[in-house]
Amino acid sequence: MCLTKNNVFMKIIHNTEVSVREQLIEIQSKIVNILAFLSSDIEETETIEVNPFPKDKSLEKKYVYGLKGLASILGCSKSHAQNIKNSGILDKAIIQNGRKIIVDAEMAITLFQKRYE
């Protein structure tokens, strides 16, 4: 085989490609070994889930929406819920903006109970 400039150049490129492939394979095998080691550590350790902020039911406010929601917590019809709302008994528990009505359920029940004790 005659060594020409192109043949030598191709041989150098081939040699560098082989060495780059070998290096990539070596790097890949090291990464696989590291991941295998880390996954074995993860399997051996116990995972404990800690909820730093436990949800306390007393802190959560329950809201109902509209006259239908108010009627459901008071156990009456929508027309009677409208009359109770208009009477002003539950004003501290009701937020109204236009046609939107939001009622704090716990406060509404306590205000209603105080009124009819």
Image (spheres, helix red, strand yellow):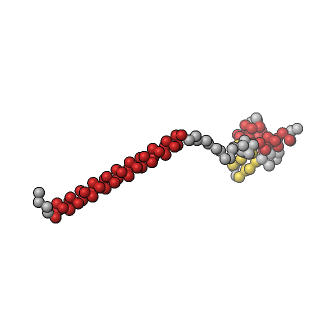
Quadrant for the N terminus, please. bottom left
Q: Nearer the viewer, residue 23 or 59?
A: 23
- Along the horizontal axis of the image, is 24 left or right of 98? left
- Along the horizontal axis of the image, is 69 left or right of 46? right
Estimate the x, y position of residue 102 in percent, counting from the top left.
71, 47
Identify the residue at image location x=40%, y=49%. Answer: 30
- Along the horizontal axis of the image, is 20 left or right of 77? left
Q: Quadrant of residue 47?
A: top right
Identify the residue at image location x=34%, y=54%. Answer: 23
Identify the residue at image location x=14%, y=61%. Answer: 3
Q: Nearer the viewer, residue 90 or 55?
A: 55
Residue at the extreme right of the image, as rendered? 117
Estimate the x, y position of residue 77 in percent, counting from the top left.
74, 36
Residue at the extreme bottom of the image, as rendered? 5
The mark tally for this picture is 0
Identify the residue at image location x=29%, y=55%. Answer: 19
- Along the horizontal axis of the image, is 13 left or right of 102? left
Q: Quadrant of residue 10?
A: bottom left
Residue 92 visible in the shown view: yes
Residue at the extreme top of the image, as rendered? 75
Estimate the x, y position of residue 52 in percent, counting from the top left.
67, 47
Estimate the x, y position of residue 109 in percent, counting from the top left.
79, 40
Residue 67 visible in the shown view: no
Quadrant for the C terminus, please. top right
